[in-house]
Image (cartoon, rainbow, N blue to C red):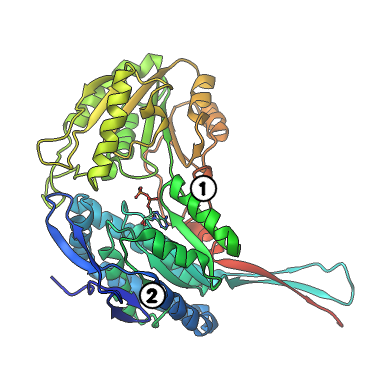
């Protein structure tokens, strides 16, 4: 394979081992084979990365936006040039089908391109002054050194959604990738180096000791911002810790996405959307449909079609050409799906399809359809993060909206209807950061991705994504 990374930390433009010599294994979820053994970093490497990012900040910030944009454009081009090798690496460490891995890399790269373009549009403003002898201007300045902590479900895209706007804005970054998928982020660092992004601007500290490195980043007064994607539970801990140094924070946390199908919906379109929203990445995305709410009049037809289509999914290793559902990421993930499913079945849910581990191996789970789900069941209230479609029947529009909103989470929601008035009413009433109307997939670099309530705050992508890494400065000029 083309050289893409060394199995080490990437700090100040160099590959470094953990000072205490520790390493940890990255395994392929499809067959548990060893993908690589890499440095298991600790406090020393975290501190070195913060020092490197701090040292690189003044000159990176001082460059023109056009300069930074040019380097990001080169980085984007290199990611696209290496898409084949990157996709294989991603599939091996994470498990998703190779076609999905390539799609993720294109999607991930699109953020680098988008923010290369946005870098040059970090405009300020002039404000009519209340004093005749003074003028008011604002400018937007980089926040400073940013710490990023990312999950395993999109090992490339979750990194570029943070690194690209941060670097575009003039910030430098220390990234702690997920212990399950650190290799893709090391490859991104190597490509950034080849693109000419200076030493210290983008540092990667892989570790199996997440809290040790995380605490170091959070406690440092030199780190001015934490950008996190992961579970609400972990997000809460990080926020509490970041409070001591009053860091800025972007929190992309858990979801519990409702997918509502009204009687007047186009059935085939709704099933297409459901398939894409539910089963992408084997159900392991924070915007995956987690709860299907289906109106009485269309319920049975929807369930029948969903089962028919779900049966056609091909479970297998991500490297096999015809696979549409890969393994889940690890044992914990499979156990969670099993636990939610069995508790819900005990409470009266019916398994209409699937419902067990798949013969392919330990971490493979059968695409599953469950009906008769009620609000008392854990499949309703918890994020399943697996290929399980849970279906609840409802009667009226008001009931659907109330059910959809009855969760502490507020990331993505979807609904299908042919009624324009209803599209507006329901779209406005849903307490979610993102709403797909007659669409089951809504992520794109040009639109703001993010949640409300306990799904977090901050937006990634779009022009709003750059704001997360800029502070507004107000200057008053007197004596005019
Ligand atoms: P999941 O359970 O889906 O893996 P997590 O929120 O636990 O979600 O993980 C997301 C990211 O947060 C990973 O990079 C993980 O290593 C990191 N993480 C988990 N716990 C901590 C912690 N206490 N401090 C810093 N990072 C953490």
Q: Is residue 203 above or below residue 311?
A: below
As drawn, which residue projects farthest toward the front?
A: 20
Task: Provide residue 21's location: percent of width, then percent of height.
Answer: 25, 74
Please count the marks in the image: 2
Q: Does label 2 point to a residue whose CB lies under 8 Å from ligand 1?
A: no
Task: Provide residue 274's location: percent of width, then percent of height.
Answer: 32, 33
Badge 1 element: strand
**Nearest to N terminus: mark 2 or mark 1:** 2
**Pick the front one: 18 or 154:** 18
- Quarter of the image with the N terminus is bottom left
Q: Is residue 459 in view from this perspective?
A: no
**Pick the front one: 71 or 20:** 20
Badge 2 element: helix
Disc nearest the viewer among 2 and 1 = 2
Q: Name the side, left or right, on which 277 lies relative to 260.
A: left
The residue depicted at 85 percent of the width and 76 percent of the height is 134
Q: Is residue 254 above or below residue 448?
A: above
As drawn, which residue projects farthest toward the right?
A: 132
- Quarter of the image with the C terminus is bottom right
Q: Which residue is mark 2?
A: 44
Task: Provide residue 238's location: percent of width, then percent of height.
Answer: 49, 55
**Pick the front one: 120 or 44:** 44
The residue depicted at 55 percent of the width and 36 percent of the height is 431
Task: Provide residue 232's location: percent of width, then percent of height.
Answer: 46, 45
Quadrant hosting residue 188: bottom left
Q: Name the side, left or right, on which 204 lies relative to 17.
A: right
Q: Which residue is mark 1?
A: 456
Mark 1 crowd level (few <14, some 14–19, many ≥20, 10 Å Cα): many
């Amino acid at each position: 394979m083309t050289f893409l990374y060394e199995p080490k930390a990437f700090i100040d433009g160099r590959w470094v081992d953990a000072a205490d010599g520790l390493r940890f294994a990255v395994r392929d979820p499809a067959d548990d084979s060893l993908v690589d053994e890499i440095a298991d970093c600790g406090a020393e490497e975290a501190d070195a990365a913060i020092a490197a990012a701090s040292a690189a900040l003044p000159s990176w910030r001082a460059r023109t936006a056009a300069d930074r944009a040019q380097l990001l454009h080169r980085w984007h081009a290199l990611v696209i040039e290496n898409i084949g090798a990157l996709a294989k690496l991603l599939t091996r460490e994470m498990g998703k089908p190779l076609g999905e891995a390539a799609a993720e890399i294109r999607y991930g790269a699109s953020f680098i391109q988008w923010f290369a373009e946005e870098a040059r549009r970090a405009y300020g403003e002039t404000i009519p002054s209340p004093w005749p002898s003074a003028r008011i201007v604002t400018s937007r300045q980089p926040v400073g050194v940013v710490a990023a902590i990312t999950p395993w479900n999109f090992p490339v895209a979750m990194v570029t959604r943070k690194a690209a706007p941060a670097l575009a804005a003039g910030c430098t970054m220390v990234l702690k990738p997920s212990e399950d998928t650190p290799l893709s982020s090391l490859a991104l660092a190597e490509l950034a180096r080849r693109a000419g992004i200076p030493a210290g601007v983008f540092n990667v500290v892989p570790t199996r000791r997440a809290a040790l490195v995380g605490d170091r980043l959070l406690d440092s007064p030199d780190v001015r911002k934490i950008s996190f994607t992961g579970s609400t539970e972990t997000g809460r801990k990080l926020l509490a810790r970041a409070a001591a140094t009053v860091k800025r924070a972007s929190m992309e946390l858990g979801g519990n996405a409702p997918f509502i199908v009204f009687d007047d919906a186009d059935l085939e379109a709704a099933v297409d959307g459901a398939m894409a929203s539910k089963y992408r990445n084997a159900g392991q995305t924070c915007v995956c449909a987690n709860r299907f709410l289906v109106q009485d009049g269309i319920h049975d037809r929807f369930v029948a079609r969903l089962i028919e289509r779900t049966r056609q999914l091909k479970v297998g290793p991500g490297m096999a050409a015809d696979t549409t559902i890969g393994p889940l990421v690890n044992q914990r993930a499979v156990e969670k799906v099993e636990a939610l499913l069995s508790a819900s079945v005990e409470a009266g849910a019916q398994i209409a399809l699937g419902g067990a581990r798949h013969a392919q191996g330990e971490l493979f789970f059968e695409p599953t359809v469950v009906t008769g789900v009620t609000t008392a069941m854990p499949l309703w209230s918890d994020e399943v993060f697996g290929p399980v479609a849970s279906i609840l029947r409802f009667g009226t529009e008001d009931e659907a909206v109330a059910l959809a909103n009855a969760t502490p989470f507020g990331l993505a929601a979807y609904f299908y209807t042919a009624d324009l008035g209803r599209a507006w009413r329901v779209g406005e009433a849903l307490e979610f950061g993102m709403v797909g109307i007659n669409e089951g997939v809504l992520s794109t670099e040009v639109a703001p991705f993010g949640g409300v309530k306990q799904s977090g705050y901050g937006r990634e992508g779009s022009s709003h994504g750059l704001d997360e890494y800029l502070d507004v400065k107000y200057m008053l000029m007197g004596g005019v």
